[in-house]
């Protein structure tokens, strides 16, 4: 198995963008046989993750067909940066970028984010949503686009991904590039690289509000977000119980670190109380009462969303509860959006321009 034979086998693989085989298209940068097997390196100008995976699968199949299953092959695909993809100060055309975070999982952060995004789109804003919960992406289900996939478009010499659109919201999620039945087992570096690609290699166009659904806790993904795009502010979602509030306080503290310094627009207390349909005047504080109020008193705004069965059901079927006119859920979500708009207006009037966070390793 020499270099010429390997390249002849690789001519079976077509590049969908150029219509040429990957050898003729100049995409094969090197082939090498070592103790680990066959090492193949490719280059492409298409940053889409599904495009790269298709290339890898096609190359592996071509090598297997030509040389047999016993040949171990490792394919590395590098994306060529032919031109600067994003200006240094963030995403061109995106006015406000709001991170939705939580100290712990299970507090309804993704549900709140999906409803805020769709609700703002209903109010006439141009809205985008980045599902940055790399290990547990849920937005494709909540916005009923689980089977959709991002497209591609070419502007000049640059190939861009185009987001999936649903209910007026432009969505990008790692869930579009992975099998829903399989766990995403990535180290931090891989996860942060994927997040940067969703921001930088996607053509967003003109956007009024971009919401980022962050994973629970404080970690690599959160730091990558603040280092990649200039956040207008952050919203913390919690439940009233003591253990959730303790973690929420850590989330607030992270954004307020001097080296990060992202404004916390407010606290949203989810599952504040439960009111049975047959007892509309009763409130049962299952997770505690007024738990987030002390934390919220330090901020400009706070919103409360009761534990409502229809909110959960709406998320499960991909129809956010904000779309249900005349319901209690719609009433509370509208009040939260009013407060978010007022907080953003106060932030804009403060005159302080958001910047990408610059950090250095100590």
Image (tube, rainbow, N blue to C red):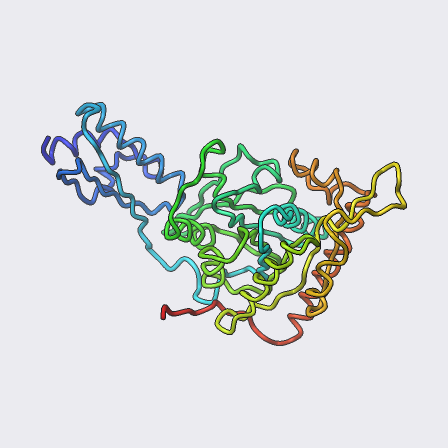
Above/below status of 224 relative to 282 = below
Foreground pick, 216 / 196: 216
The residue at 17%/35% (across/down) is 37
Above/below status of 237 relative to 258 = above
Q: Give the farthest residue toward the bottom.
A: 351
Count of numbered circles on the image: 0
Across and down, in percent, residue 180 comes to 49, 33
Left or right: 73, with 306 as reference point: left
Q: Quadrant location of the N terminus?
A: top left
Left or right: 200, with 62 as reference point: right
Across and down, in percent, residue 8 comes to 16, 30
Residue 278 location, quadrant = top right
The residue at 68%/52% (across/down) is 239
The residue at 31%/51% (across/down) is 80
The residue at 21%/37% (across/down) is 23
Q: Quadrant location of the C terminus?
A: bottom left
Q: Give the farthest residue toward the left.
A: 2
Residue 308 location, quadrant = top right
Q: Is residue 97 visible?
A: yes
Q: Is residue 210 visible?
A: no
Across and down, in percent, residue 50 comes to 40, 38
Above/below status of 85 relative to 68 = below
């Amino acid at each position: 198995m020499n270099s010429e034979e390997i390249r002849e086998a690789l001519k079976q693989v077509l590049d969908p963008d150029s219509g040429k085989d990957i050898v003729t298209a100049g995409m094969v940068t090197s082939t090498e046989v070592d103790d680990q097997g066959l090492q193949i390196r490719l280059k492409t100008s298409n940053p889409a993750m599904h495009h790269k995976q298709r290339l890898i699968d096609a190359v592996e199949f071509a090598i297997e067909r030509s040389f047999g299953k016993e040949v171990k092959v490792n394919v590395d695909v590098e994306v060529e940066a032919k031109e600067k993809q994003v200006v240094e100060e963030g995403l061109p055309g995106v006015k406000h970028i709001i991170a939705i975070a939580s100290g712990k999982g299970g507090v309804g952060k993704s549900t709140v984010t999906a409803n805020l995004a769709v609700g703002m789109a209903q109010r006439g804003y141009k809205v985008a949503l980045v599902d940055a919960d790399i290990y547990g992406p849920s937005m494709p289900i909540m916005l009923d686009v689980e089977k959709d996939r991002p497209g591609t478009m070419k502007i000049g010499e640059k190939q861009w991904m185009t987001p999936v659109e649903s209910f007026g919201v432009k969505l990008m999620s790692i869930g579009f590039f992975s099998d829903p039945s399989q766990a995403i087992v990535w180290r931090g570096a891989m996860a942060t690289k994927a997040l940067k690609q969703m921001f930088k290699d996607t053509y967003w166009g003109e956007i009024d509000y971009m919401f980022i659904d962050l994973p629970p806790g404080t970690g690599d993904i959160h730091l990558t977000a603040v280092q990649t795009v200039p956040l207008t502010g952050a919203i913390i979602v919690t439940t009233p119980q003591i253990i959730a509030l303790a973690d929420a306080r850590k989330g607030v503290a992270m954004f307020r670190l001097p080296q990060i310094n992202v404004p916390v627009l407010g606290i949203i207390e989810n599952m504040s109380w439960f009111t049975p349909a047959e007892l509309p005047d009763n409130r049962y504080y299952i997770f505690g009462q007024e738990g987030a109020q002390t934390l919220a008193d330090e901020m400009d705004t706070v919103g409360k969303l009761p534990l409502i069965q229809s909110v959960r059901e709406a998320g499960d079927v991909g129809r956010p509860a904000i779309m249900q006119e005349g319901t209690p859920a719609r009433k509370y979500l509208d009040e939260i959006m009013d407060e978010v708009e007022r907080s953003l207006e106060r932030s804009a009037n403060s005159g302080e321009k958001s910047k990408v966070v610059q950090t250095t390793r100590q």
